[in-house]
Image (cartoon, helix red, strand yellow):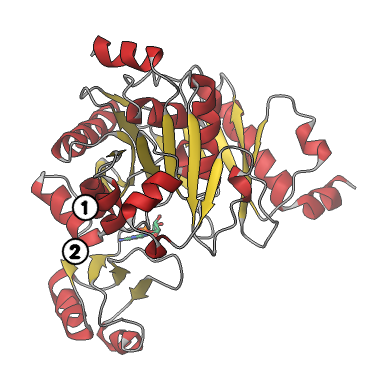
């Protein structure tokens, strides 16, 4: 292990290429630069690369117009390639892997991209998910309704950046609403609708030497279906559930020989945890690690993929994160010196993630109160003014 590390320190600067150019790419680059790493980014023609402007070379290209070797050369012969979004061609990653390392591996990304492969892996490992069945057409959904019971959530197995990929079907009569929605070339699963108490996520990392570390488990709030805030550690989470979640993560990471940061989303129902989804990259619910941990999820992703051992993941204090979903931050809010602003340089659009704010406080109750106040100040500023007047 020490040989690799010494080699890293003595060698010329490492180069990392990121497929994608959004805020996650931005924050990985910002975390890697102090370690002397240089970055390049592959932006698709429709992408706005503003978040990574000035952080490295941006190749704006339709990857299908180049072969893998040309892309590898154009990206500056990187030592490692990684991703900032799940929706990346696995075929492309496998081809690029002939020229340099790709972490997480294309095989691991392929499993996490496809809900059927992902849930099959989880269940094979003995890890619990909501009851599910493959259901590629309305007849199969009707069968699933009989086997699992209604309501069902129908989910596409293909990650798509555009269009709807999930439907809630309450009963057998409602299935036919889906007739025109399901694409014959796509596959789907039918999943039991879970009455969960809350949503949690665990961010874990594994390095090339097999070391695994976990961050505190976060509780996530999606009031309008999109992550608004996360708080870690999740309040009153029983130690046996923390252990169960960590053991699940370790089983998954080892099974797929994963390198990098992996996020696991859970549903908590009483004393039980069900895994909802695996996300093979740094994740929005781990942004709080930027304020609370010596090594944020971004630092540890970069460390692990370039061959350094995973760094300390323990938090110095409870922390939270509030997403800025199409809202500006005014000077008044930023008067609070304990807030940590991350702004992505994106165009302001309705519901667009344009940044986030991290908070930390030694007292978990005070942190929750501060987080709720910040959400109110950001999202209902007029209401608050009315109350104050
Ligand atoms: P997903 O794309 O699977 O992460 O789902 C997005 C959100 O939909 C989750 O964060 C949950 O709030 C909700 N959801 C997904 N699957 C289910 C389910 N089986 N039962 C209840 N809610 C779900």
Is the residue marked by circle 1 packed among few (<14), some (14-19), or many (20+) residues within 10 Å? many
**Can you identify the residue that label 1 sits on?**
129
Can see residue 31?
A: yes
Q: Is residue 179 left or right of residue 320?
A: left
Q: Quadrant of ligand 1?
A: bottom left
The residue sitting at 38% across, 17% down in the picture is 11
Residue 120 in percent (x, y) is at: 14, 55
Q: Is residue 363 above or below residue 357?
A: above
Residue 268 in percent (x, y) is at: 32, 45
Q: CA distance from mark 1 to mark 2?
A: 8 Å
Residue 142 in percent (x, y) is at: 19, 82
Q: Nearer the viewer, residue 372 or 50?
A: 50
**Can you identify the residue that label 2 sits on?**
132
Q: Is residue 188 above or below residue 251?
A: below
Can you name the residue that lies furthest to the right here? 389
Q: Are marks 1 and 2 in contact (CB under 8 Å)?
A: yes
Q: Quadrant of the N terminus?
A: top left
Q: Nearer the viewer, residue 262 or 128?
A: 262
The image quadrant of residue 145 is: bottom left
The residue sitting at 38% across, 27% down in the picture is 215
Mark 1 element type: loop
Q: Nearer the viewer, residue 358 or 145?
A: 358
Q: How many marks?
A: 2
């Amino acid at each position: 292990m020490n040989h690799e590390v010494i080699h890293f320190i003595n060698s010329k600067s490492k180069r990392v290429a990121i497929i994608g150019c959004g805020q996650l790419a931005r924050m990985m680059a910002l975390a890697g630069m102090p370690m002397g790493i240089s970055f390049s980014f592959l932006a698709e023609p429709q992408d706005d690369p503003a978040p990574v402007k000035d952080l490295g070379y941006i190749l704006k290209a339709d990857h299908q117009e180049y072969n893998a070797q040309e892309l590898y050369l154009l990206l500056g012969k990187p030592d490692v390639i990684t991703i900032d979004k799940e929706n990346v061609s696995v075929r492309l990653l496998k081809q690029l892997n002939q020229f340099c390392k790709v972490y997480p591996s294309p095989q691991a990304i392929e499993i996490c991209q496809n809900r059927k492969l992902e849930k099959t892996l989880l269940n094979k490992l003995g890890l619990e998910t909501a009851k599910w069945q493959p259901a590629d057409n309305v007849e199969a959904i009707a069968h699933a309704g009989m086997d699992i019971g209604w309501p069902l959530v129908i989910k596409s197995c293909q990650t798509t950046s555009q269009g709807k990929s999930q439907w809630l079907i309450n009963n057998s009569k409602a299935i036919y609403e889906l007739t025109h929605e399901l694409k014959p070339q796509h596959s789907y699963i039918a999943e039991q609708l879970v009455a969960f108490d809350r949503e949690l996520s665990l961010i874990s990392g594994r390095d090339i030497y097999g070391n695994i570390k976990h961050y505190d488990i976060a509780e996530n709030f999606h009031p309008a279906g999109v992550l608004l805030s996360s708080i870690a550690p999740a309040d009153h989470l029983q130690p046996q559930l923390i252990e169960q979640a960590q053991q699940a993560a370790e089983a998954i990471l080892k099974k797929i020989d994963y390198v990098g940061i992996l996020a696991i989303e859970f549903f908590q129902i009483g004393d039980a945890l069900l895994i909802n989804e695996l996300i093979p990259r740094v994740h929005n619910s781990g942004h709080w690690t930027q304020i609370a941990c010596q090594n944020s999820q971004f630092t540890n992703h970069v460390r692990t993929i370039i061959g350094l051992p995973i760094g300390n993941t323990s938090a110095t204090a409870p922390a939270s994160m509030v997403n800025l979903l199409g809202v500006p931050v005014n000077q008044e809010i930023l008067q609070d010196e304990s807030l940590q602003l991350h702004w992505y340089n994106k165009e302001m659009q309705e519901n667009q993630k344009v940044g986030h704010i991290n908070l930390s406080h030694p007292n978990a109750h005070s942190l929750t109160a501060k987080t709720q106040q910040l959400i109110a100040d950001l999202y209902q500023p007029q209401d608050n003014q009315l109350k104050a007047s």
